[in-house]
Image (cartoon, helix red, strand yellow):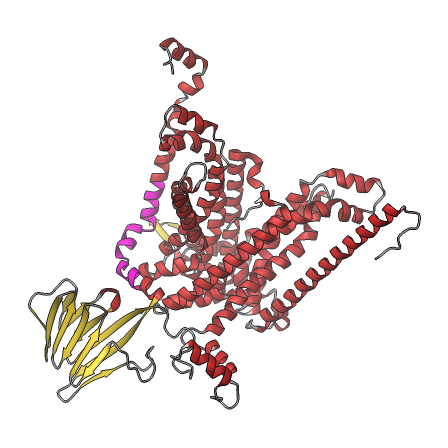
């Protein structure tokens, strides 16, 4: 796209024009270089993914929407029967149509449908681990903040500690505790909770470092000690942001505990994996619907509460933190 | 500093009643919230029977497993028969086919095993003397069991006919009628580079280097360098080849998933943004589509695509692609709705076509933000790709999970964790560096 330099330009103009063209050419060259590198990376990645996959992409492409078949029950009412554990007219002794089997009886004939119970289990894992993460993250974050702790050593130790908790793969923590406590929701809780301590602690200490220090100065002037300064000067102004981050984390943790559940942590994730694996359409659809509704409900509730707490700044960077 | 007079205090109180006399509900709010949290924790304690699970947990195993991450044990059995005392090693010992460790010294019927300074086991026919830091215990082996002589020190236990002496980290020995089973522990990872079947096993770095560069061919069909690489790649206890392939899959899953998601959500975000596409229905349909993709959990997509493509990275790529098209689409359309309109008006006023208005009026504003957000998701997907791998969607997750479930391969777990942490560290730094170049230093 190099243009001829117009003869009407002055000597200075020609020089500027030439300089601009040089810059543009270099920029274009870089763009091309990056595009080619990216293209090579993409082609290589796709080839590698296809080679190391069990089924090949083009062979399996016609089966892409097979999962839809996993979701179509024999009739529309089957979904609700599976969801609320009502007996099915197709019941033939197999697990596929044996919905009442999973009922959790509370008292007498009053029962809790299985999948609601499992969903509650997953939600409780998420909430409890967010709570644990919040409490420990809260206690740790003040030690990592530059404006509150003068000692570099304490700050360094607190930050590295949170970094390790955050970076350590959740699945390894879950596996380690599963080896000690046997499979179940509690290893999942440990895994999600420990990760949450690190993730929230990091976000928290960044909030604390951005806090307005005037209140702190005032308290220092009247002779408050460190705990009083933190408690009365910092905590009231950072609490709304802390809550907002904790709610955001709750959204993530609901998803995380579902996934950990699928690999042995119990809860709805495990039910979903088993149901898909066994080809129980109605059960799968019931679980997917339940999960979808719960996740949307949690997201909406958390968004509403966050907007009330800190206004629109809570939505500055999407809905995902790690 | 002057103290406040009581008149001044009452004056403050009357001027700011909300501060000094808040309504009752506000005063007890923190207490109520605290009580609610405590109640909830108690409820969860009951719901999951946390107390019972924690107390029935085998916590002593935690230490054993944690130890396995960074050390390995070599087992050996000393058999005492009337004719001869023999020292045997298991078939697949870490020490190779013909072990001659220097911590076992056999002299006729006398076998001395050293567990480091001050800790040793002396086996002499049917008399075993264990010494630990000056204390020593003599155990006589009779036909009906091991008989400790004198009081048991705290590092020895008697269980039925068996005496177990422990030497801390260095190992332990079970003294059983007719034999002594010894487990000797060493820090480090055994046979990390070459396994015991390799001709390069137990050679120093210099020896291996000289064998590769100037030695005679060990196998006629391949050079020594190729053989060495082959031996490392197919190391039977560490499976370097498999681990690295799976790790590469995890990286590829995160990279391709995020890239495809950002490419697809880029045009869709323009349709979803109110200020760019004035059609209400188009906005709503795209936005609800994003919500749907996002709310169907990555797990559900992963399980479905594992059915479609079979286990492997294609399933993982698709799962990340679907979920993140939703999330990135939402983020992108929100960014587009917050752009500065002046540039668009400027481009429009000189008569540009609608497509050119987007190209020159909108894209230059949002492209750095979009790229930065995509990088951020790439970083976070590198972590989540590990987890969804465990349900069969490809990558190192499943291998990690299986290694943990065997309960004996904790050193392999440690190896994979180190690799994952290194990958996360590297990609965090790349993504941070690129993002700070795109957005300027302040933005993250």
Query: Measuring 53% from the left and 87% from the top, which residue is drawn there?
Result: B222
Tell me: B197 left or right of B161.
right
Magenta span: chief secondary structure: helix
Tell me: B436 left or right of B81.
right
Residue A274 seen in this snapshot: no
Tell me: B274 left or right of A210.
right
Where is residue B444? Give x, y as percent: 56, 45
Farthest front residue?
Answer: A11
Magenta span includes B59: yes
Quarter where residue B319 is shown: bottom right
Residue B372 seen in this snapshot: yes
Where is residue B388? Give x, y as percent: 50, 61
Farthest left residue?
Answer: B150
Magenta part of the chain = B39-64
* As drawn, B247 above or below B352: below
Quarter where residue B105 is shown: bottom left
Q: Nearer the viewer, residue A111 or B147?
A: B147
* As drawn, B263 above or below A230: below
* As drawn, A234 above or below B386: above
Number of labels in the image equals 0
Query: Measuring 46% from the left and 66% from the top, which residue is drawn there?
Result: B398
Where is residue B310? Give x, y as percent: 54, 70
Tell me: B194 left or right of B318.
left
Query: Measuring 34% from the left and 49% from the top, which residue is drawn there?
Result: B47
């Amino acid at each position: 796209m190099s243009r001829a330099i117009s003869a009407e330009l002055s000597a200075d103009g020609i020089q500027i024009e030439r300089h601009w063209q040089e810059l543009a050419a270099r920029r274009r060259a870089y763009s091309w270089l990056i595009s080619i590198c990216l293209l090579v990376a993409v082609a290589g990645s796709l080839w590698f993914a296809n080679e190391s996959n069990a089924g090949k992409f083009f062979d399996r492409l016609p089966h892409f929407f097979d999962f839809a078949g996993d979701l179509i029950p024999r009739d529309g009412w089957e979904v609700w029967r599976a969801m609320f554990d009502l007996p099915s007219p197709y019941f033939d002794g197999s697990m596929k149509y044996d919905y009442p089997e999973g009922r959790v009886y509370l008292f007498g004939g009053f029962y809790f449908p299985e999948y609601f119970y499992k969903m509650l289990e997953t939600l409780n894992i998420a909430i409890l681990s967010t709570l644990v993460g919040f409490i420990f993250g809260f206690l740790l974050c003040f030690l990592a903040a530059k404006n509150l702790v003068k000692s570099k050593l304490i700050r360094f130790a607190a930050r590295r500690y949170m970094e390790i908790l955050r970076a350590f793969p959740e699945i390894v923590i879950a596996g380690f505790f599963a080896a000690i406590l046997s499979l179940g929701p509690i290893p999942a809780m440990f895994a999600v909770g420990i990760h949450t301590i690190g993730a929230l602690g990091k976000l928290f200490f960044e909030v604390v470092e951005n806090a307005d220090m005037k209140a702190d100065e005032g308290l220092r002037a009247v002779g408050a000690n460190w705990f009083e300064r933190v408690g009365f000067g910092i905590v009231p102004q950072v609490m709304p942001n802390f809550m907002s981050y904790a709610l955001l984390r709750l959204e993530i943790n609901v998803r995380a505990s579902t996934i950990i559940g699928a690999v042995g942590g119990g809860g709805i994730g495990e039910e979903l994996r088993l149901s898909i694996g066994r080809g129980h359409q109605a059960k799968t659809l019931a679980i997917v619907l339940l999960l979808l509704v719960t996740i949307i409900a949690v997201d909406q509730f958390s968004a509403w509460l966050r907007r009330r707490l800190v206004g629109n700044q809570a939505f500055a960077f999407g809905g995902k933190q790690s | 500093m002057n103290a406040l007079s009581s008149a001044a205090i009452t004056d403050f109180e009357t001027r700011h009643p909300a501060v000094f006399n808040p309504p009752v509900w506000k005063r007890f709010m923190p207490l109520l919230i605290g009580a609610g949290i405590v109640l909830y924790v108690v409820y969860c304690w009951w719901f999951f029977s946390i107390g019972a699970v924690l107390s029935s947990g085998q916590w002593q195993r935690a230490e054993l497993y944690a130890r396995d991450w960074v050390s390995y044990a070599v087992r050996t059995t000393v058999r005492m028969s009337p004719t001869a005392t023999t020292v045997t090693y298991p078939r697949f010992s870490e020490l190779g086919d013909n072990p001659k460790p220097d911590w076992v010294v056999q002299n006729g019927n006398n076998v001395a095993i050293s567990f480091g300074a001050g800790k040793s086991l002396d086996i002499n026919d049917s008399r075993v003397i264990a010494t630990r830091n000056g204390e020593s215990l003599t155990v006589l082996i009779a036909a009906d069991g091991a008989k400790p002589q004198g009081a048991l020190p705290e590092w020895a236990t008697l269980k039925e006919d068996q005496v177990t002496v422990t030497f801390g980290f260095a190992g332990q020995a079970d003294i059983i009628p007719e034999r002594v089973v010894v487990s000797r522990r060493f820090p480090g990872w055994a046979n990390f580079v070459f396994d015991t079947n390799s001709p390069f096993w137990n050679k120093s770095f210099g020896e291996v280097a000289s064998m590769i560069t100037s030695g005679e061919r060990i196998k006629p069909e391949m050079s020594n360098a190729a053989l060495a690489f082959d031996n490392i790649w197919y190391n039977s206890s560490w499976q370097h080849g498999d681990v690295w392939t799976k790790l590469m899959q995890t990286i590829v899953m995160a990279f391709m998933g995020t890239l495809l998601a950002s490419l697809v959500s880029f045009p869709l975000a323009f349709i979803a943004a109110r200020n760019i596409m004035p059609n209400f229905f188009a906005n709503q349909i795209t936005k609800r589509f994003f919500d749907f993709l996002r709310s169907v959990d990555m797990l559900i997509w992963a399980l479905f695509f594992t059915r479609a493509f079979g286990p492997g990275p294609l399933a993982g790529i698709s799962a990340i692609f679907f979920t993140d098209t939703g999330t990135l689409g939402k983020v992108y359309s929100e960014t587009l709705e917050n752009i500065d309109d002046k540039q668009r008006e400027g481009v429009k006023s000189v008569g540009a076509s609608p497509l050119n208005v987007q190209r020159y009026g909108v894209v230059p504003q949002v492209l750095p933000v979009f790229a930065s957000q995509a990088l951020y998701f790439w970083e976070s997907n590198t972590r989540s790709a590990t987890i969804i791998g465990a349900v069969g969607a490809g990558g190192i997750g499943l291998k990690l999970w299986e290694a943990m479930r065997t309960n004996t391969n904790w050193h392999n777990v440690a190896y994979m964790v180190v690799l994952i942490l290194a990958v996360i560290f590297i990609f965090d730094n790349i993504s941070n560096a690129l993002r700070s170049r795109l957005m300027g230093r302040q933005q993250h």
